[in-house]
């Protein structure tokens, strides 16, 4: 009877580890990993060359007393705390060590402690935090129940260390997302739009594929352009709106000697609420459809690229943000593309067909990010690599968002669609046979 119970327990543990890795980790894996880390810590630090020699004083005392030479000193383990997806270590470095040594030894630590992933970062001088992931959290993406979303900050994907990747427009106003066909780029786009729909923000779409990607969200879009001619006019209208908003900000500055610094307006967030214009998020589905041209000098293309560069350079303070998507985004698209790319701080790369595409996004950030982007398999749709201007990068994977779910969210919050005078002529024309929605009531525009 006892052997039968033990066998059933083993079977249950194996099934949990296979089918429900998160449950297995919380029930058994976290405790086992913490015991393993505590027992192996000093040995692993020594094997990974993360120790330092004993101090001169201790060596001198050992020689004087004719004792054994002291062993190498490992960094001090300050905290070992389990998390929902792994274990977090806080380590006090020894004199002479730096954070790069721990980052370089991440793969060796992963094998030594028998965990899935190890990420190291410096918290403050002398202290590093090592985040260990106990299982592959990107194999089955399950977003946490509690998400710290806010105004223009939406949860998009799950990071490989178990955290949540947020698209924060106030921190990173403009971004570019590239990826091959069937790589998950469209799902990433739908997820962003789905989470932006409930917020007080104007959504503007440019989809030169006759609107097949962004057309279903028409009820929540303040403007939509489905061909290059309309796109050029729409971008010019956005530039005019931006210039008008800057005039409002300039009138409200009223700088004098006794004006507190906190009351000097430099962007829309410094304006009084009754004057603050609605932020605008511009989604461009395929940048190549706007940049490619058969003519050597195409006036329409020059208008489009010039307007995009101006919006990318000046739009943040006016509350205009760009999300650009495409299969490729490089200098082969023509003049001005490199200048535009330099203004796009956010870089997200899904599976690509060639290394040069990844280099276009991450070549000025990190060669390791380029290699990681080229290693994404075809079977893991939605997986991507995010690069930061600091040189850091991380793998993410977007949960599968069906088109129907994103459209339902847009329709449910269609009453939040703001009316913008400059973009009124680009408002999508809805099907007259569709049921009528409640009238829209929005605050007057400042521009």
Image (cartoon, helix red, strand yellow):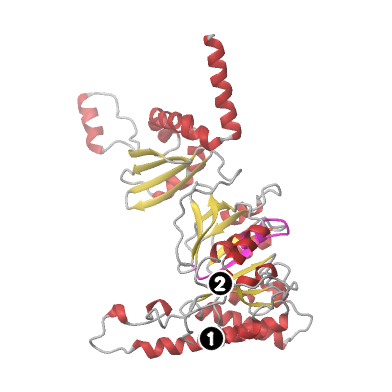
Is residue 72 rendered to the left or right of residue 30?
Answer: left
Q: Which residues are magenta?
A: 172-190
Mark 2 vs mark 1, CA separation in Å: 22 Å
Q: Nearer the viewer, residue 348 or 121?
A: 348
Say whether residue 362 is visible. Answer: no
Image quadrant where residue 197 sits: bottom right
Above or below residue 200? Residue 69 is above
Other-residue count near label 2 (Cα within 10 Å), few / some / many at <14 / 14–19 / ≥20: some
- Residue at image point 75% right, 71% down: 209
Q: Position of residue 136 (x, y in %)?
A: 57, 41
Q: Is residue 175 magenta?
A: yes
Q: Nearer the viewer, mark 2 or mark 1?
A: 2
Above or below residue 14? Residue 411 is below
Q: Indicate the secondary structure of the residue bearing disc 2.
A: helix
Image quadrant where residue 298 sits: bottom right
Image quadrant where residue 433 sits: bottom right
| The residue positioned farthest toward the right in the image shown | 294
Is residue 270 rendered to the left or right of residue 61?
Answer: right
The residue carrying mark 2 is 415
Q: Nearer the viewer, residue 332 or 283?
A: 283
The residue carrying mark 1 is 241
Other-residue count near label 1 (Cα within 10 Å), few / some / many at <14 / 14–19 / ≥20: many
Above or below residue 147? Residue 243 is below
Q: Position of residue 244 (x, y in %)?
A: 49, 89
Above or below residue 143? Residue 16 is above
Q: Position of residue 185 (x, y in %)?
A: 66, 60
| The residue positioned farthest toward the top in the image shown | 1
Q: Indicate the secondary structure of the residue bearing disc 1.
A: helix
In which quadrant of the rendered image does the N terminus lie? top right
Q: Position of residue 443 (x, y in %)?
A: 47, 81
The number of numbered discs placed on residues in the rendered structure image is 2
Say whether residue 59 is visible. Answer: yes
């Amino acid at each position: 009877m006892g052997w039968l119970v033990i066998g059933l327990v083993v079977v249950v543990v194996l099934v949990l580890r296979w089918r429900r890795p998160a449950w297995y980790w919380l029930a058994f894996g976290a405790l086992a990993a913490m015991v393993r880390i505590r027992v192996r810590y000093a040995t692993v630090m020594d094997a990974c060359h993360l120790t330092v020699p004993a101090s001169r004083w201790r060596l001198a005392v050992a020689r004087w007393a004719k004792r054994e030479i002291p062993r190498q000193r490992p960094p001090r383990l300050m905290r070992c705390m389990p998390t929902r997806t792994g274990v977090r270590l806080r380590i006090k470095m020894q004199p002479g060590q730096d954070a790069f040594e721990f980052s370089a030894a991440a793969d060796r630590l992963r094998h030594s402690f028998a965990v899935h992933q190890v990420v190291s970062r410096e918290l403050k001088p002398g202290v590093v935090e090592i985040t260990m992931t106990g299982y592959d959290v990107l194999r089955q993406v399950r977003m946490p129940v509690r998400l710290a979303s806010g105004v223009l900050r939406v949860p998009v994907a799950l990071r490989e260390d178990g955290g949540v990747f947020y698209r924060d427009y106030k921190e990173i106003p403009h971004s570019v997302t590239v990826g091959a066909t069937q790589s998950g780029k469209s799902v990433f786009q739908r997820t962003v739009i789905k989470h932006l729909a409930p917020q007080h923000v104007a959504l503007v779409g440019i989809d030169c594929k006759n609107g097949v990607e962004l057309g279903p969200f028409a009820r929540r879009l303040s403007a939509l352009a489905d061909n290059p001619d309309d796109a050029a006019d729409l971008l010019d209208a956005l530039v005019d709106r931006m210039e008008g908003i800057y005039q409002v900000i300039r009138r409200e500055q009223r700088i004098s000697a006794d004006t507190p610094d906190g009351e000097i307006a430099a962007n829309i967030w410094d304006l009084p609420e009754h004057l603050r214009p609605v932020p605008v998020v511009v989604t461009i589905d395929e940048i190549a459809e706007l940049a490619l041209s058969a003519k050597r000098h195409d006036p329409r293309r020059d208008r489009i690229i010039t307007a995009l560069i101006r919006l990318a350079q000046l739009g943040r303070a006016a509350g205009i943000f760009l999300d650009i998507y495409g299969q490729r985004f490089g200098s082969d698209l023509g003049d001005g593309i490199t200048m535009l790319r330099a203004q796009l701080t956010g870089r997200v790369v899904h599976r690509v067909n060639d290394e040069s595409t990844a280099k276009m996004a991450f070549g000025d950030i990190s060669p390791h990010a380029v290699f990681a982007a080229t290693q994404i398999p075809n079977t893991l749709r939605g997986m991507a690599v995010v690069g930061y201007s600091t040189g850091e990068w991380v793998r993410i994977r977007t949960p599968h968002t069906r088109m129907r779910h994103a459209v339902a969210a847009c329709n449910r919050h269609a009453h939040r669609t703001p009316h913008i005078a400059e973009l009124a002529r680009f408002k999508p024309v809805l099907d007259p046979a569709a049921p009528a929605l409640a009238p829209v009531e929005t605050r007057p525009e400042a521009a």
